Image: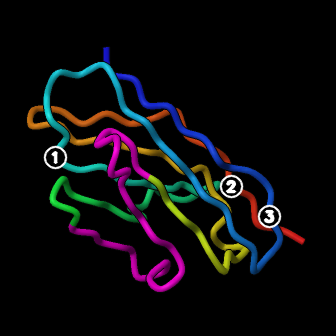
Amino acid sequence: QVQLVESGGGLVQPGGSLRLSCAASGSRFSIAAMGWYRQAPGKQRDLVATISSGGRTNYADSVKGRFIISGDNGNKNTVYLQMNSLKPEDTAVYYCYVNYPSNTYVGQGTQVTVSS
C-alpha cells in the first residue's frame, strides 16, 4: 500500500515563505518522478512543479522564480517544495504525487493560505 505523507502547509502573509515536504513509502518500485499539484476553491487542479528521478525540474509559469522543488539526497522517496514570495493567489490545497513505472499516487493534500 503506497502512502504519501505531506506536511508544511499553513497560513502565511503575502511575501512570506513556506516549505512543503512529502515522503512516499510502500512500493518496491523505483520512483520515476515526484511533484506537486494545487487546487484553489472553484478551480481545476493545476500542476505546480515536478522533479524527475534524474533531478530534472519543471515549473508552472505562475511559480517560476519563486518556488523551488528538490529531492532529499539521503532519501530518494522525499520531495520538498520551497515556496517564496507567496501571493494570495497561491492559496490552495497542495497535493503531492509520485509516479511509479506503472501507476501514479496522490496525497491527501495540505492547505496553504496566503493572507494578511
Callout 3 environment at 10 Å: few (<14), some (14 to 19), or many (20+)?
some
Tell which circle, 2 or 1, labels the residue nearer the N-terminal end.
1
Image coordinates for residue 104, horizontal then vertical, percent: 24, 36
Q: Amino acid at mark 2?
A: Val
Tell which circle, 1 or 3, labels the residue nearer the N-terminal end.
3
Q: Vertical placement of 89 versus 10: above or below?
A: below
Callout 2 environment at 10 Å: few (<14), some (14 to 19), or many (20+)?
many
Q: Nearer the viewer, residue 64 or 42?
A: 64
Q: In the current view of this chain or complex, which residue is farthest to the bottom?
A: 65
**In 3D space, how far apart are the residues under numbered discs 2 and 1 (Cα atoms)?**
26 Å
Image coordinates for residue 101, horizontal then vertical, percent: 9, 37
CB within 8 Å, label 1 to label 3:
no
90 with respect to 47 (left or right):
right
Q: Which mark is residue 32?
A: 1
Q: Please report the bounds of the magenta region as a residue range.
A: 56-79
Instruction: Name the residue carrying label 2.
Output: 112
**In 3D space, how far apart are the residues under numbered discs 2 and 3 (Cα atoms)?**
8 Å
* Element type where label 3 sits in the image: strand
Tell which circle, 2 or 3, labels the residue nearer the N-terminal end.
3
Residue that appears at 51% across and 56% down: 38
